């Protein structure tokens, strides 16, 4: 999901090995279809789990690459961080992370056993 002022753009894909391998391509295609530029992205919020090792590893690797290349700050959250998990909407994640003072550029993944 991209949040640009009051406009939200979102897309979903199947959780599969094929999509893990082409995650950065899927993100790039999404940005191109919406006429958005990665250079204008200032923050990325990524779910750190709980989840599968491969899914979390790939998501965090892509986010770290974006951070290194484009100097985009990232925030890793888990829905377990929020007390009212059932009512959390993706578009509210930035405000909730600010409220809970989630540290930027820090990763502490939660893997399912």
Image (tube, rainbow, N blue to C red):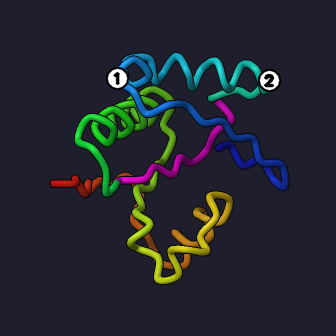
Residue 65: give x, y in percent of width and height.
Answer: 39, 29
Front position in the image: 106 or 21: 21
Locate residue 26: give its quadrant.
top right
- Label 1 environment density (alpha carbons within 10 Å; few <14, some 14–19, many ≥20): few
Q: Is residue 73 above or below residue 28?
A: below
Q: Nearer the viewer, mark 2 or mark 1?
A: 1
Residue 57: give x, y in percent of width and height.
Answer: 28, 37
CB atoms of marks 2 and 1 within 8 Å: no
Q: Residue at x 25, y 57 (%)?
A: 110
- The reply, left or right, for residue 44 in relation to residue 81 is right
Residue 16: give x, y in percent of width and height.
Answer: 39, 27
Q: Give the numbered dot on residue 85.
A: none
Q: Is residue 17 above or below residue 72?
A: above
Residue annotated with mark 2: 35
Q: Residue furthest left?
A: 113
Residue 5: give x, y in percent of width and height.
Answer: 81, 53
Which stretch did the figure color magenta?
39-48
- The reply, left or right, for residue 60 in relation to residue 73 is left
Locate residue 9: give its quadrant.
top right
Q: Residue at x 44, y 17 (%)?
A: 22
Q: Residue at x 78, y 27 (%)?
A: 34
The local secondary structure at tag 1 comes to helix
Q: How far apart, in angstroms, are the residues tagged by discs 2 and 1?
A: 27 Å
Location of the N terminus by quadrant is top right
Locate residue 12: give its quadrant.
top right
Q: Residue furthest right?
A: 6
Q: Give the numbered dot on residue 17.
A: 1
Sequence order check, earlier mark of 2 and 1: 1
Magenta includes 40? yes
Q: Residue at x 26, y 34 (%)?
A: 54
């Amino acid at each position: 999901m991209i949040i640009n002022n009051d406009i939200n753009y979102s897309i979903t894909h199947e959780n599969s090995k094929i999509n893990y391998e082409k995650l950065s391509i899927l993100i790039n295609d999404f940005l191109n279809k919406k006429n958005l530029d990665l250079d204008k992205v200032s923050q990325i919020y990524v779910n750190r789990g709980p989840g599968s090792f491969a899914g979390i590893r790939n998501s965090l690797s892509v986010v770290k690459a974006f951070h290194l290349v484009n100097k985009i700050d990232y925030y890793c959250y888990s829905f377990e961080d929020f007390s009212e998990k059932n009512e959390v909407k993706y578009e509210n994640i930035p405000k909730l992370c600010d409220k809970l003072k989630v540290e930027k550029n820090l990763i502490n993944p939660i893997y399912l056993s």
